[in-house]
Image (spheres, coloured by chain):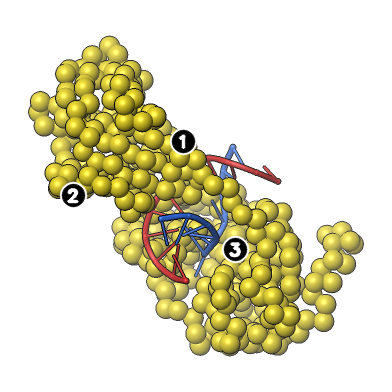
Chain colours: A yellow, B red, C blue
Amino acid sequence: MTRKQQEQQNDIIGSFAIETFQDDLLYWFERQQRDLPWRQSRDAYRIWVSEIMLQQTRVDTVIPYYERFMERFPTVEKLADAELEEVYKYWEGLGYYSRARNLHSAVKEVKERYGGTVPDTPEDVHALKGVGPYTAGAILSIAYGLPEPAVDGNVMRVLSRIFLIEEDIAKVSTRKVFEAVVRRIIAHRNPSFFNQALMELGALICIPRSPRCGSCPVASHCRAREQGVQEALPVKKKAKQGRVEERGVALVRREDGRWLIHKRPESGLLANLWEFPNVECQGEAEAREKISMHMYGAFGVKCTPQDLVMEHSHVFSHLQWNLHTYICRYEGQDGEQGEAAVKDRMLWVTIDEMENYPFSVSHKKIVEALHEGFQQSLSWSSGQ
DNA sequence: TAGGCGTGGAC
DNA sequence: TGTCCAAGCCT
């Protein structure tokens, strides 16, 4: 750390009552912490899995996924030996699917390079796929008791208020400011509880809007509270609005009653997940022609879109799909055309067999509508 | 550095 | 209904 950075940090910390703050925070956490599944063990693998699942994902959403996942993959060995497709199936609906791919890859590395034991140095942990600065700090402090910062959105919100830090938390570089602060104030007698307590405080008390300062165990330490500006922190630049895509979706049933599904590419949006063939289009008029061309070009399947059976939209963090789903008349398949491009990424399956393949939520809704025969599907619903 | 990358809950 | 956002990471 340069001398200038040191001086900046001294400004931030100032005459802060570190020991009293630690006592107040830890006392509160020991009494008020939630009983969560991943808190029943300090096994580094279990902590690791929970931290990956919790990235940008709510606790209530994660719990059932975590329980199912740990029952099926209780150890590094079990997960490393599983097929990626099955891991995806356990991740289906949780989102950010590269987390599952990276976790599976990293667990294989731990098995092979470290004999199945999660490494306990910052360099080795951070080198694992999908493990960034936050997750590395969480594993090292919670599982191994090391005094490493674990700075997530909660921690930045809490500390931005306590120390009145006005840097934009949307900037990657800002995280380092908070890591430096944590290194100054972390309780070395219990780094695990200290880090978890900061996050728990952010989740339960020091929430984004209308923080519950009246119930806050460290309100007396809070500079934002003192000045009445807690609602204005943290500073965060607004995200850009995502674009909208119209997509025509093809439901093609062969004479034997099987439907065509497609496995998405290995990278990018919804990588490796299954879906019904679809193509970007402008309006309904263009959709039928585009679908017909796409089906032959990509799959060698000749078909004609007929009834528009379902319309629904799906909102991603950076993109919105408006999906127009057509039942298509199957008119044969040209083995010379298209098939080579997709190889084993296309399959003809029965409706029941679709349960065996991981689908994204937007296409899972189409599977469900197929089950119901599209009785109630001819209406728009936003992201539901 | 900024944008890609999912989903569902809260207000 | 729209908007924000929740225990981030990768490129």
Checking the image for residue A152, the label placed there is 3
Asked if residue A273 lies left or right of residue A125, the reply is: left
- Identify the residue at the far right of this view: A3
Q: Earlier in the sequence, mark 1 or mark 2?
A: 1
Alpha carbons under labels 3 and 2: distance apart: 42 Å
State the quadrant of the N terminus of chain A.
Answer: bottom right
Residue at image mark 1: A267
Report x, y in % for residue A194.
61, 76
Report x, y in % for residue C6.
52, 64
Q: Nearer the viewer, residue A67 or A384?
A: A384
Q: Secondary structure at mark 3?
A: loop
Name the image quarter holding residue A152: bottom right
Residue at image mark 2: A376
Label 1 neighbourhood size at 10 Å, few (<14), some (14-19), many (20+)? few
Q: Earlier in the sequence, mark 3 or mark 2?
A: 3
Residue depicted at x 71% and y 54%: A173
Report x, y in % for residue A243.
50, 40
Above or below, A349 relative to A112:
above
The amino acid type, in three-letter code, at marker 2 is: Gln
Asked if residue A206 lies left or right of residue A181, the reply is: left
Total numbered badges shown on the rendered structure: 3
The amino acid type, in three-letter code, at marker 1 is: Ser
Q: Secondary structure at mark 2?
A: loop
Discs 1 and 2 carry the same chain letter:
yes
Name the image quarter holding residue A230: bottom right
CB under 8 Å between callouts 3 and 2?
no
Q: Earlier in the sequence, mark 3 or mark 1?
A: 3
Report x, y in % for residue A202.
57, 73
